[in-house]
């Protein structure tokens, strides 16, 4: 399931001269507009990591090509939330424990808090914002979660939705046991597990 | 009033935003020029700042300001401080740094030199109570309600007077007695006497308590994570030293609180103070690790309970002692609430309570779902089973004979209650769970695995009165229901708003709930905590809607003749009884209200409304027909929420692991208002209960006082794999007698009934081995199964 190449970061293999090159090609004005969400504040020179070099990347997010300046150590969750304005992806722990930040990378569920943005160049990223059709029709999982009253506080919900979508892509007819195992990486402190599994089963039936 | 909406499911308006990612939480807001703020926190459990050198940090590029304890409002101990120069727990905020981004702020914190003098500390209340034991604070070790910090010690004789593993009891801070407990014990057929421990545990709200704030036109705008809406304003205002009207609080969604975000809390005003200092918006993200320090926790108990039963199982006498671990500050009233719960759930004919609230150098304690009631359920319910075993009666039967009904007595004063249907909940649950048949499988073996069954009960007060309701009928005929309830995720902000629509007999599709932002004109409502919302705010919305109905009828009488009493409402019209053609639509009546002015359109209002509600009415005045009223309906006695839980498990004697095979929770929440929401609470409350019973606890290194359970994987809130594949839920569905629509709350007991039922089932699987400790962990089960001694001392706390 997991791409073995993910174990190696391009940056780790980069030579000093390559790093210099990277620094040299940073473009600022053409990156994601400064009126969108930026991690450092407006009107300030980027001051992350003591002047660490940002690099302009093209990312495929929810079917769109997004150009964005990315730091070497930047996580996908931070890029999505603070540079692309996609705040549906939540940060509950920022350390791969809770699953609130779950997104799809090439249709496989990943914790975006623990995925470096540089590693997902050329990959298809789907966030919770990318599920609804342009005419407002919800993804079957989203609709089923509404119908079964899955969410409570709702903070883990985007992650739960994404894990359920990922499950149904590989297993369109899961059992309740399949569903709880597939969703086990998504914590819900409200404890709404039963209703989320009800939602998965309803979505599978309707799909 | 026809029953149009009560008992019917609906889609709460905020659910769609939650599944699409559009729902905004505090960290999802941005403001131009926003700074980021990080905290420098204490590395030790108790210390005093001797000096702080910030020169290098302030010289760094991108660092904008540093805020120290000397610059923020100070409160009298033991109130939780905003920032402190004498930290009393690991992770307590000492100062805050604002910078252009978080990395810069963190780098600045690394460059700050804080010279801290270590001071004595304790993580065990009993240790602190010893004659020469350490105190959590320089001023003492006990938080006396309304008296501040004092030192309480017990004598060496107090400690020597009890046997091994028994809780000593010296002079208590609080004690009360009703009836004659000694006579009851003398008369009892069976007396059980057990010392116990219930562990403290963290809240683990999925959304850390992030806040963003800025000042604009003299007002402070705060985007925060709070369970409550209107209720947090006075607290925020108090901490910031401004009037509540000077604060705009935006809390459309709250990513979980479980009691820890019920009121305004000190750390959330740091961005507001920093924004004032810098003149720029400030975002303060709280990390998961920080959340374990500043995110509140449930108090732990070291306790002892003696119960004397008649031969038929009736509880004649009870003697309860609790030493509560209250953290370093004022703590929370779990200990006294626990005693009140025992008076109610078991209806003892006589009872004595002795209690202590002792400070430790651990995170500040606050309310956590069923604070006190759920710990004591975990301690007492297994003891009840022990007595049942000795008496030779069934576990459900011993609960049934003591269970509170409509004539039940509550508290040390033995006062009345508004309604109680625990006997009905037990009966309904035993039948639906098929208790008798499942109990017959108790003890069945399958290899190393054995079946256990358990039943548990829990209680919480579930309602208050005296708050305000507010609604507006617009000239277009839309009914805007304004609610000051927070959005904790139970959807009760919406389900209680529906009572206004119920009274007005209007189409729910024509209603809009206005909530989540104090600038929208919200009424004064109680906080969303303590299972109270359903009782309290159905009453406020009922009162506001009744006020609107009276105004509709008065306008109709004025325009169409006769007196107001000649008119009725229906189909969003007010019409003359016997002559329905003489009618006004709600839209027409709202237009007339604007023309007539006065109280019809909110130009005038009732004197008894809260100032916050009055300001909101003035804000809405002249825009429609205003219904605004204080809940002055009668309430005599406590409002009980009750629940019974039934569990069957299969426990592996070799590994100590178990699987929950079946779960049923039955709620007494009065008339069921929102069936799907109730079912969600019954099931999900059980999940949290299973965590309390078998997974979650705080652990400290006793030598250095450092916390060890500071990650989700260490503190272990339940996952999908820790709970049953499917759970069952039901409700008694009989009306509360003092709510106009029969409704009361339920949020907390649905947790405690499940946690205590699980502990009973574990004991049952082990043939009646009582741990007198929660959580029960796999190593404890393996030791018990192998008849080996446990690795902990009987009353030891906060250690692995």
Image (cartoon, coloured by chain):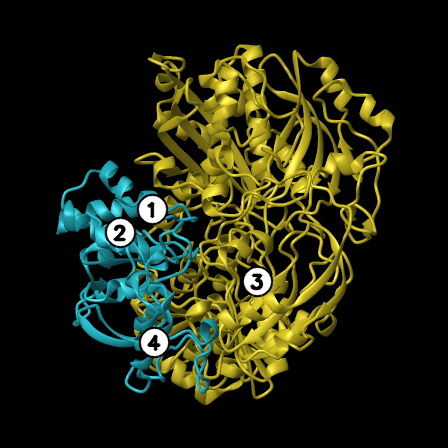
Query: Residue under circle 3?
Result: B631
4 vs 2, front mark: 4
* Res A163 label: 2
Task: Chain B: give its colour.
Answer: yellow
Gap between marks 2 and 1, in whole Å?
8 Å
Q: Chain of mark 1?
A: A
Left or right: residue B93 compared with residue B292: right
Callout 1: SS? loop
Residue under the image location 57 percent in, 11 percent down: B391
Gap between marks 4 and 2, in whole Å?
39 Å
Q: Are marks 4 and 2 on the same chain?
A: yes
Circle 4 crowding by C-alpha within 10 Å: few under 14, some 14–19, many from 20: few
Query: On screen, B349 above or below B625?
Result: above
Q: Are marks 4 and 3 on the same chain?
A: no
Callout 2: SS? helix
* Res A20 label: 4
Left or right: residue B696 compared with residue B242: left
Gap between marks 1 and 4, in whole Å?
39 Å
Lower sequence index among marks 4 and 2: 4
Residue B196 image point, x, y percent:
64, 27
């Amino acid at each position: 399931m997991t791409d073995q190449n993910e174990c190696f970061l391009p940056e780790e293999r980069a030579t000093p001269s390559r790093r210099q090159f990277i620094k040299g090609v940073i473009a600022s004005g053409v990156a994601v507009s400064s009126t969108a969400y930026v991690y450092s504040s407006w009107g300030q020179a980027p001051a992350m990591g003591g002047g660490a070099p940002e690099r302009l990347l093209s990312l495929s997010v929810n079917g769109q090509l997004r150009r964005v300046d990315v730091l070497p150590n930047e996580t996908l969750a931070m890029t999505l939330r603070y540079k692309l304005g996609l705040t549906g992806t939540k940060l509950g722990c920022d350390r791969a424990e809770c699953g609130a930040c779950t997104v799809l990378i090439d249709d496989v569920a990943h914790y975006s808090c623990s995925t470096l943005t540089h590693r997902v160049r050329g990959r298809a990223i789907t966030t919770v914002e990318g599920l609804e059709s342009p005419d407002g029709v919800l993804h079957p999982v989203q609709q089923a979660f509404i119908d079964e009253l899955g969410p409570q506080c709702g903070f883990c919900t985007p992650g739960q939705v994404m894990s359920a979508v990922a499950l149904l892509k590989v297993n369109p007819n899961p059992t309740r046991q399949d569903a709880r195992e597939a969703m086990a990486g998504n914590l819900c402190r409200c404890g709404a597990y039963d209703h989320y599994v009800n939602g998965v089963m309803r979505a599978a039936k309707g799909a | 009033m026809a029953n149009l909406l009560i008992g019917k499911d609906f889609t709460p308006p905020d659910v769609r935003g939650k599944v699409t990612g559009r729902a905004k939480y505090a960290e999802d807001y941005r403001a131009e020029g926003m700074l980021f703020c990080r905290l420098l926190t204490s590395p030790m459990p108790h210390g005093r700042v001797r000096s702080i050198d910030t020169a290098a940090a302030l010289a760094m590029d991108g660092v904008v300001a540093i805020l120290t304890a000397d610059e923020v409002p100070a409160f009298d101990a033991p109130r939780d401080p905003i920032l402190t120069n004498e930290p009393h727990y690991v992770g307590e905020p000492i100062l805050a740094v604002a910078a252009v981004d978080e990395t810069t702020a963190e780098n600045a914190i690394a460059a700050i030199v804080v010279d801290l003098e270590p001071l004595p500390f304790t993580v065990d209340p009993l240790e602190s109570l010893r004659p020469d034991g350490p105190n959590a604070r320089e001023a003492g070790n006990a938080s006396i309600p309304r008296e501040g910090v004092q030192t309480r010690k017990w004598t060496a004789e107090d400690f020597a007077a009890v046997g091994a593993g028994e809780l000593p009891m010296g002079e208590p801070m609080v004690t009360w007695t009703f009836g004659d407990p000694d006579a009851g014990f003398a008369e009892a057929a069976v007396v059980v006497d057990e010392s116990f421990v219930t562990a403290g545990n963290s809240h683990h709200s999925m959304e850390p308590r992030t806040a963003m704030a800025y000042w604009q036109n003299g007002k402070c705008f705060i985007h925060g994570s709070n369970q409550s809406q209107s209720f947090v304003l006075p607290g925020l205002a108090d901490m910031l030293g401004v009037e509540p009207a000077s604060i705009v609080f935006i809390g459309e969604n709250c990513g979980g609180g479980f009691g820890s975000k019920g009121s305004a809390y000190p750390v959330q005003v740091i961005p507001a103070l920093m924004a004032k200092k810098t003149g720029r918006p400030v975002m303060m993200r709280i990390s998961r690790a920080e959340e374990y320090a500043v995110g509140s926790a449930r108090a732990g108990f070291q306790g002892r309970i003696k119960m004397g039963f008649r031969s038929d199982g009736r509880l004649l006498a009870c003697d309860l002692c609790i030493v509560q671990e209250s953290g370093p500050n004022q703590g929370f009233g779990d200990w006294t609430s626990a005693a009140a719960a025992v008076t109610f759930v078991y209806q003892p004919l006589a009872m004595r309570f002795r209690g202590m609230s002792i400070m430790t150098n651990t995170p500040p304690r606050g309310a956590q779902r069923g604070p006190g009631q759920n710990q004591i359920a975990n301690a007492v319910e297994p003891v009840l089973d022990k007595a049942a075993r000795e008496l030779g009666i069934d576990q459900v039967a011993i609960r049934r004979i003591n269970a509170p009904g409509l004539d039940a007595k509550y508290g040390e004063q033995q006062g009345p209650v508004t309604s109680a249907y625990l006997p009905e909940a037990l009966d309904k649950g035993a039948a639906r769970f098929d208790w008798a048949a499942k109990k017959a499988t108790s003890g069945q073996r399958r290899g190393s695995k054995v079946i256990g069954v358990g039943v548990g009960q829990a209680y919480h007060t579930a309602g208050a009165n005296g708050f305000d309701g507010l609604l507006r009928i617009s000239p277009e005929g839309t009914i805007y229901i304004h609610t000051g309830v927070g959005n904790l995720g139970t959807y009760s902000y919406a389900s209680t708003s529906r009572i206004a629509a119920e009274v007005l007999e209007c189409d729910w599709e024509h209603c809009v709930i206005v909530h989540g932002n104090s600038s929208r004109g919200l009424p004064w409502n109680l906080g969303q905590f303590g299972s109270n919302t359903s009782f309290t705010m159905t009453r406020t919305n009922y009162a506001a809607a009744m006020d609107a109905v009276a105004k509709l009828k008065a306008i109709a009488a004025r325009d169409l003749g006769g007196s107001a009493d000649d008119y009725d409402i229906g189909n969003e019209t007010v019409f003359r009884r016997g002559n329905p053609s003489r009618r006004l639509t709600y839209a027409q009546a709202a237009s007339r209200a604007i023309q007539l002015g006065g109280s019809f359109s909110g130009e005038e209002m009732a004197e008894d409304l809260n100032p916050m509600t009055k300001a909101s009415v003035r804000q809405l005045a002249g825009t429609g027909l205003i219904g605004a009223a204080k809940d002055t309906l009668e309430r005599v006695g406590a409002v009980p929420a009750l629940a019974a839980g039934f569990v069957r498990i299969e426990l592996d004697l070799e590994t100590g692991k178990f699987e929950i095979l079946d779960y049923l929770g039955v709620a007494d929440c009065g008339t069921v208002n929102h069936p799907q929401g109730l079912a969600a609470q019954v099931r999900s409350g059980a999940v949290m209960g299973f965590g309390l019973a078998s997974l979650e606890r705080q652990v400290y290194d006793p030598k250095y006082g450092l916390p060890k359970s500071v990650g989700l994987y260490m503190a272990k809130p339940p996952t999908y794999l820790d709970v049953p594949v499917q759970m069952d839920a039901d409700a008694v569905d009989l009306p509360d007698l003092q709510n106009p629509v029969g409704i009361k709350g339920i949020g907390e007991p649905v947790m405690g009934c499940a946690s205590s039922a699980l502990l009973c089932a574990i004991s049952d699987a082990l043939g009646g081995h009582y741990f007198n400790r929660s959580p029960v962990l796999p190593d404890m089960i393996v030791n018990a199964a192998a008849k080996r001694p446990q690795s902990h001392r009987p009353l030891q706390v906060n250690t692995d």
